Image (cartoon, rainbow, N blue to C red):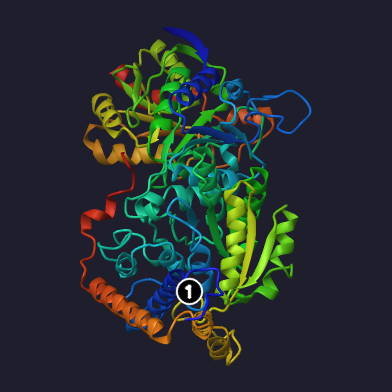
Amino acid sequence: MSKNPFPLSKDELLKAYRTMRTIREFEERLHVEFAKGDIPGFVHLYAGEEACATGIMMHLTDTDRIASTHRGHGHCIAKGVDVHEMMAEIYGKATGACRGKGGSMHIADLSKGMMGANGILGAGAPLACGAALASKFRGDKGVSVTFFGDGASNQGMVLESMNLAAVWNLPVIFVVENNGYAESTSVDYATAVDSYVDRASGFGLPGVTVDGADFFAVYEAAGEVIRRAREGGGPSLLECKMARFFGHFEGDAQTYKAKDENELNRANRDCIKMFADRVREAGVVTAAELGAIEKEVEALIDDAVAAAKNALPPTPRELTTDVYVSY
Amino acid sequence: MARKISMKQAINEALDLEMKRDPTVIVMGEDIVGGAGAPGEEDAWGGVLGVTKGLHAKYPGRLLDTPLSESAYIGAAIGAATCGMRPVAELMFLDFSGVCFDQILNQAAKFKYMFGGKAKTPVVIRAMVGAGFRAAAQHSQMLTPVFTHIPGLKVVCPSNAYDAKGLLIQAIRDDDPVIFCEHKNLYGHETDVPAEAYAIPFGEASVVREGKDVTIVSYGLTVQRALEAAEKLAKDRIQAEVIDLRTLSPIDWDTVVESVESTGRLVVVDEANPRCSIATDVAARVAQEAFNALKAAPQMVTAPHAPVPFSPVLEDLYIPTADAIAKAASKIASHAIAA
């Protein structure tokens, strides 16, 4: 084995690969299962963006909190939410992470610091400020990360939150997951500035843009901004540029994309493939080790889908439970 | 020991006592300390009408002045509440909920249910409500029905200093999000208030005057108007029972229905606009639950279906008056007295 040139140990590299593969397998499988018609509502898939969630979450513990988006499966998995509970939730079953009452867009596990996927674009930003404020009061050194897309980056809630975080010097990281599309609308059309870093500086925040398909670039940039926040240095913005392999939602015909865009992205901008090639070519991890993880992940997702399909839905009495703690 | 203090002082006292008792209670809002970063005095305002005055000195660092940025700080209060704090966020005027409604409607109100029961969001949003301040259409609304409509929120609107203190203490200790509505024209209203802490449970209406001929149900400022109306009615030998709902969500249906079952007549007084209001809600419920006891059609005395006007002449016509309440009660009760 060669000397490890990466900032992570071999075990950590394998963990990152397992996380990214789990997200990819989860999403690819949902794409197939959704088409069968068994999954209610709509789902928004994260495939192609795995390096962003994983590269950031490798720096976080359960004390750190994240506020996610409608495209939240990747954030959940990378933050340690149970894959079986997630799958059951997406199928609307009582064994789901939210007992079947939230669905794909509202998966949460506060014990893991996952404050919830969110159906309202940009709504996580003020919530993450609140989580960071709570950490500051508690003195637990916790950092909060709010994810939003290039589309939601234009929401007032997000912009107000950047100012609030700067004014209160909160340990918050604003992560722009720039996949080029706000639903079907291009970032070039909907965002007036060329760089989110410029926008951050308008709020007095340091910002950095990285290639979101490059796990190591994300990992290193995230490490820097998270460390600064943890040490009391305040909020930052991190823009990850990446490719969304699927449509906005499942069923989206994606007619707004260039004809061969998805194929080209899968060929040239696949963060998992790029990661695997690098660690293997560096001689740190073998193809067999990666293959073993792939098999393991495939079995996990198979099992999660089977369990979700077999699980019971919530009972009718659940219709009106848990509206309040007491009423 | 009880002393006469104003509702404004009672609210300040509730915040003080709870901040002393529980270190997770923090307070945030625009100008709640006042003069942040400015060259003049510290604690310059203590809130736009001085409700939080003096708390900053007692609890340094726990009252946070915010930028004029309601979405951000109301959302931050909600986020902090899900992470173990008990924030009390002052929204100044409930009319401003328009700019941060998502955080209340889609976030705070939904977490408990949407996350399968695992979240709790013990946040209090204090805000001024009501007309009569010559503050016109965007600083005077009684938006209580808007929030009462939303499952997951609790809605409180006290009519006097004693209730305000006990209900605010309960709101801060409560594990659900509470919209705490303070009628700005009651801030100077004084009642006997014990110095110590006490909590008034939610969902318990108060029978503030007993009577056998007609039930008048209200909340907030118009409870005082209803009491004036009851005095007027007594001169005409009509004995009005006045019920102060105190909390609109949860609401104490039992006390209302029992009273109407005994009087047979209902007048609901609501300073909110008339459609889909607390008035329609109470009238409908009573019609359903106590139809056989009713001797006359339930009456609703409300603000008109119009924004709050500026001109004092018009604004005085806007809020339900004691005369209007007495007239509505007389209309359904006077023939019973004559008989």
Vertical side of A103 occupied by B322: above or below: above
**Residue holding disc 1:** A46
Quadrant of the snapshot with the C terminus of chain B: top left
x, y percent for residue A133: 54, 43
Q: Is residue B204 visible?
A: yes
| Residue A56 image point, x, y percent | 53, 64
| Residue closest to the eye, B224 or A288 | A288
Number of marks drawn: 1
Q: Quadrant of residue B291?
A: top left
- Closer to the camera in the image, A209 or A3: A3
Q: Give coordinates of residue A254: x percent, y percent.
A: 53, 84
Callout 1 amino acid: Tyr
Q: Residue at x 41, y 82 (%)?
A: A290
Left-right relation of B302 to A90? right
Please name the residue shown 47% across and 30% down the image: B23
The residue nearer to you, when weighing B252 against A172, is: A172
Res A264 → quadrant? bottom right
Tell me the subunit letter for badge 1.
A
